[in-house]
Image (spheres, rainbow, N blue to C red):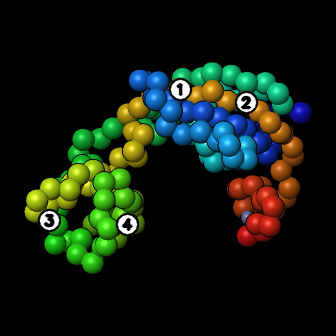
Amino acid sequence: MTVKKDAVVEMHYTLKNDSGDVIDSSQGNDPMPFIQGHGNIIPGLESALEGMKVGESCDVSIKPEEGYGIHHPEAIQEIPKEALQGIDNLEIGMELQSQDEQGNPFVVHVKSINEDTVTIDANHPLAGETLHFNVSIEKVREATKDELEHGHVHSGSCSH
Ligand code: ZN
């Protein structure tokens, strides 16, 4: 069967940025499982994989709009260091839970640590990046009823 909506797909992937640096890769690990058509992976990759067969591989470049979104400069904020008292090992790249005015939680990451302030960024670390994937399809199967209800793959001992 081919990659199509509601199929469970296992893929190996290598992700590079515009400069050709490897940002992420499944090599050396198990292939990454996901359900096609359920937003488990970024939209641009879902459309590129649609119709592929086991054993096939492809190179695909994905624009930010179809990846992790465009970069919003206004999502970068400088906050007083005191606001983060109690967080040990504050370091660049660390993810923190924040809240908007309505109390909705969202994730920010630490962009830089300054003398009295910390710069936090609510953009995804890959926002604004064109993503260059090399993907190979290792396995395709029908999703189970439970998997479709939950919207994620059940594998190994995981049965939540
Ligand atoms: Zn589940």
Check whether the beta carbons of the residues at disc 2 and disc 4 lie within 8 A of each other.
no
> Considering the image in quadrants, where does the C terminus appear?
bottom right
Secondary element type, mark 2: strand
The image position of residue 84, as x and y in percent, is 24, 71
Check whether the beta carbons of the residues at disc 1 and disc 3 lie within 8 A of each other.
no
> Considering the image in quadrants, where does the N terminus appear?
top right
Q: Of label 1 and label 3, which has the lower sequence position?
A: 3
Quarter of the view holding residue 88: bottom left
Q: Total of numbered circles in the picture? A: 4
The residue at 41%/23% (across/down) is: 19
Left or right: where does residue 81 sit relative to residue 97? Answer: left
Quick one: label 3, few (<14), some, or many (20+) residues within 10 Å? few
Circle 3: residue type: Pro
Residue that mark 1 sits on: 132
Q: Of label 2 and label 4, which has the lower sequence position?
A: 4
In the rendered view, tell whether residue 77 sits above or below residue 16. below
The image position of residue 155, as x and y in percent, is 79, 58
Q: Which numbered mark, 2 or 4, is in the foreground of this view?
A: 2
Residue that mark 4 sits on: 97
Secondary element type, mark 4: strand
Left or right: where does residue 28 sit relative to residue 89? Answer: right
Q: CA distance from mark 3 to mark 2?
A: 46 Å
